[in-house]
Image (spheres, rainbow, N blue to C red):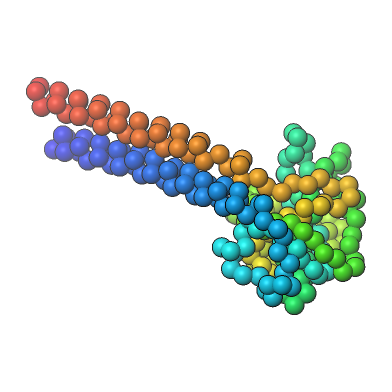
Amino acid sequence: MRALVLIICLLLGCALLVNLGLWQLKRGNEKEEITSLYDQRKKSVPTRLLEQGRLGPTESTIWKNYQLSGRFLNKVYLLDNRLKNSSAGYDVLSPFKIFEGPVVLVCLGWIAQGVNRDTLPQIPTIDEKVKIVGIFTPPPFSGLDIMPSVLRYEEMEKNRFRIQRIDVQDIGSKLDVDMYPLMFYTENPLPGLIRNAPDPGLYQPHKHYAYALQWFSMAFVLACIGCYNLVRRGRG
């Protein structure tokens, strides 16, 4: 009976380690596909939205250059705890209403936090109709999704909010607008802001392959130790 329990534990342990390895392989493949797609699309000439008529599915839009025409809504969201060159700061986000199209959450650039956290840095506003050029990406992951929605919107000044994470659909719901599910990073940030478009090259898929190898190696070692102990017990 004891030997049966040991065999079951051995099988479960090996299965767990192998599945962790397979998961890391899957993550590596996903990030490799993202990097490959980015390399293909980043060199493309920006597509004018008016020529296309509307934004297509996210699969055909992601990592693609676009030129959008429209107007910024009078809301600014500062994504907290964004580091650049070892300095704390914010990603500056604002909803942008495309003419005859949806609202897109646009990242206007990065700005340092400053000495006093209770005072927001000065951010210029854009009131006129403009054209912006940039790239569509998935929203960056930041913070934990364990807080009530209301706690993620800290109104520091009128129409200026500090947030801990991005939920595009939740922002759209609060603004009562049709929000496109991808983020848009401008090629030319506002004066005083630093460009911070994400680089898929930083995803480093090879790290996941290395982790997968470690999990598979641990499963192999565990299997060897378990088989050795079972054989030894059988002889005894």
Residue 137 in sight: no
Residue found at x 57% / y 52% = 37
- State the image quarter where residue 23 is shown: top left
Q: Residue furthest left?
A: 235
Relative height, residue 219 to residue 55 (above, below): above
In this rendering, position of residue 236 left or right of residue 125: left
Does residue 108 lie above or below 82 as drawn?
below
Locate the C terminus by quadrant: top left
Please state the horizontal and vertical placement of residue 170, each as a whole percent of the image.
Answer: 66, 66
Which residue is found at the position 66% from the left and 52% from the top? 42
> Which residue is at 58% across, 42% downward?
203
Residue 220 visible somewhere in the drawing = yes
User: Which residue occupies 84% across, 55% down?
Assistant: 156
> Residue 60, percent across and down?
58, 64
Split into 4 quadrants, where in the image is the N terminus? top left
Image location of residue 191, percent across then percent down: 89, 50
Residue closer to the observer: 144 or 85: 85
**Observer-nearest of 12 and 126:** 126
Q: Which of the 4 image quadrants contains residue 226? A: top left
Query: Is 131 drawn above or below residue 28 in the view shown?
Result: below
Give the side of residue 230 with respect to residue 140, left or right: left
